[in-house]
Image: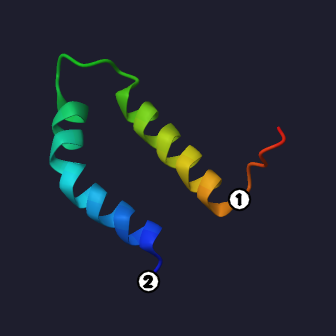
Amino acid sequence: MNRTVLFIIILGYLLSPYVYTWLADPNGSWYRPFIVWGLSALILSIMSGRISRDS
């Protein structure tokens, strides 16, 4: 298995309770889930090589 994928899986496993608590906070902002989805889409697109370094 790729080391990067393994690192992301372990990091997600360790941080998921904190992220869920942060997202489910009733006093939080409405855009919090969109931040998480946007960051995950950005990270996955960078990892797949779709975003070139020239742009």
Q: Give the mark, 2 or 1, whose residue is nearer the N terminus.
A: 2
Q: Is 53 located above or below residue 13 in the figure?
A: above
Name which residue type carries label 2: Met
Picture residue at 15% right of the left edge, 47% below the top: 17
Residue 17's disc is none
Q: In front: 29, or 40?
A: 40
> Please, what secondary structure does the residue beneath circle 1 have?
loop
Residue 49 numbered tag: 1
Residue 22 image point, x, y percent: 21, 32
- Depth check: 45 or 33 in front? 45
Separation (CA) of disc 2 from disc 1: 18 Å
Q: In the picture, which quadrant includes the N terminus?
A: bottom left
Residue at position x 23%, y 60% from top?
13
The residue lying at 79 percent from left, 49 percent from top is 52
Label 2: which secondary element? loop
Identify the mark at residue 1; answer none if there is no mark. Answer: 2
At 17% across and 27% down in the image, what residue appears?
Answer: 25
User: In the rendering, at what x and y percent does residue 3 appear?
Assistant: 43, 73
Q: Are marks 2 and 1 in contact (CB under 8 Å)?
A: no
Q: Amino acid at mark 1?
A: Gly
